[in-house]
């Protein structure tokens, strides 16, 4: 078997640690970087360094930001009576693209997963509890992913937050727009029927 030079092997090993990057993808990326000019590679290295140096967690909602509080928490135009809870910072971008939601956010940085050793203490739940105790939040929208971990997290949070007073809601789930019913599994179809509404 052909062995790569030690620096190339190390680069491939580091790239494989990234989510969604297997051995073949890591090899392609490594060889792309080798073929790239030094200036292009330096720009990549500098952008990684800059992100690590300048990006922090918002002290209010835990979103990644370069200012504290983040632009959502600092905005006077956001509805402070609502908090939408998501698993990861990139979920905010998806929600913001709709231009429908105008409230605040709270990022958990994960979901409950006993198999992976992620319990309530590993998630950013404490800050959410503090926010609810010290504000006039009327509704908490649980927008965790529609999978086993996301459902478990939503159920745990609803039981934990309900005694604090706000209305606890869950985003609707079911058959995605543009798909055919023949491709929907039982769980998706069940959610679609349960979350049906009058037209």
Image (cartoon, grey):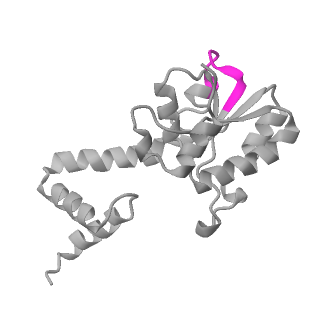
Q: Residue at x 55, y 21 (%)?
A: 100
Give the quarter of the image for residue 191. Answer: top right
Q: In front: 177, or 37? A: 177
Image quarter in which the C terminus is found: top right
Counting the numbered discs, the total is: 0
- Is residue 145 on the magenta stretch? no
Q: Is residue 120 left or right of residue 149?
A: right
Residue 157 placed where, x, y %?
74, 47
* Along the viewing direction, whichever of 10 and 155 lies nearer the viewer: 155
Where residue 193 appears, x then y in whole percent?
60, 38
Q: Residue at x 63, y 47 (%)?
A: 108
Q: Which quadrant does the N terminus fall into?
A: bottom left
Range of magenta residues: 73-83
- Residue extending farthest to the front is 182
Q: Residue furthest top?
A: 77
Q: Residue at x 29, y 71 (%)?
A: 10
* Image quarter of residue 80: top right
């Amino acid at each position: 078997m052909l062995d790569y030079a030690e620096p190339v092997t190390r680069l491939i090993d580091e790239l494989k640690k990234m989510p969604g990057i297997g051995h073949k993808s890591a090899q392609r990326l490594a060889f792309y970087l080798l073929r790239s000019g030094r200036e292009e590679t330096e720009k990549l290295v500098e952008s990684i360094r800059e992100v690590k140096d300048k990006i922090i967690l918002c002290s209010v909602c835990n979103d990644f930001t370069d200012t504290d509080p983040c632009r959502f928490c600092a905005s006077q135009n956001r509805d402070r009576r609502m908090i939408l809870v998501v698993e990861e910072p990139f979920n905010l971008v998806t929600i913001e693209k709709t231009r429908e939601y105008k409230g605040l956010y709270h990022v958990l940085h994960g979901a409950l997963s006993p198999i992976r050793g992620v319990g309530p203490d590993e998630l950013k739940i404490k800050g959410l509890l503090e926010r609810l105790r010290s504000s006039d939040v009327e509704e908490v929208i649980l927008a965790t992913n529609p999978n086993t971990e996301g459902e478990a997290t939503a159920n745990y949070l609803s039981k934990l937050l309900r005694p604090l007073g706000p209305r606890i809601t869950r985003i609707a789930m079911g058959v995605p727009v543009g798909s055919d019913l023949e491709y929907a599994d039982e769980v998706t179809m069940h959610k679609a029927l349960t979350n049906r509404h009058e037209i």
